[in-house]
Amino acid sequence: MLVLVFTSPDVQTLLTNVSMTSCDEDLYFVMVSVPATLSFSKRQDSERSVDGGGWLMFVQSMMTLALMFALGALVLLSVVLMRYMLRFEIIFLLGAFILEAITAVPVFLSVAVFGGMCFDRSWLQYPNYNHLSWAYALAVVAFFFHTLAAVMLLGEAFKARERRRRANNLIYNMQPRS
């Protein structure tokens, strides 16, 4: 990765401006003079505003939120899977259901917005040659899997509640030893 970064023509122009400067006898530091036109030019400012309008930032933020909620659900499910705190199994399952249901919403929003705006001419010069990649198809599949996981977690929470009710009834109905 570093080889690719340092073989870039922009970096080569930056490295011509590198000089070693001594501020003390034993301490050297590198001074790099970066022209302001490289990172703050009007050309790049217009490219930055065109490259991904507000909708692309919305898609990225929704997918980031979905990732955070999905990881939270995985943490709760790992606690249930380890059978660590069985007292709170129903609460953890309901929490995982809520997080998975919340995860499905931003994934759906990002898939819908990106699918609707990907052929827009404002951010892509030739949208006729654009096509939705496998990543978009996997995002659609991820939406369905998150929705299915939420429904299955809700069903599992109801089953866990029924198991707990039956276990309590079994304890109360046991005959004492005489």
Image (cartoon, grey):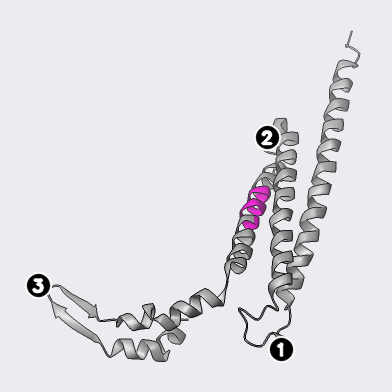
| Residue type, label 3 | Asp
**What residue do we see at 83% from left, 32% from top?**
161
| Image location of residue 104, percent across then percent down | 74, 55
**What residue do we see at 48% from left, 79% from top?**
46
Main secondary structure along the magenta-highlighted residues: helix
Residue 110 located within the stretch drawn in magenta: no
The residue closer to the viewer here, 100 or 124, is: 124
The kind of secondary structure element at disc 2 is loop
Q: Quadrant of residue 83?
A: top right
The part of the chain drawn in magenta is: 66-74
Q: Residue furthest left?
A: 25
The residue mark sitting in front, 2 or 1, is 1
- State the residue position of label 3: 24
Disc 2 versus disc 3: distance between alpha carbons?
Answer: 60 Å
| Image location of residue 108, percent across then percent down | 74, 60
| Residue type, label 1 | Tyr
Left or right of 166 in this view: 103: left
| The C terminus lies in quadrant | top right
- State the residue position of label 1: 129
| Image location of residue 18, percent across then percent down | 24, 85
First in sequence, mark 2 or 3: give its number: 3
The residue closer to the viewer here, 119 or 3, is: 119
Categorize mark 2 by other alpha carbons within 10 Å: few (<14), some (14-19), many (20+): few
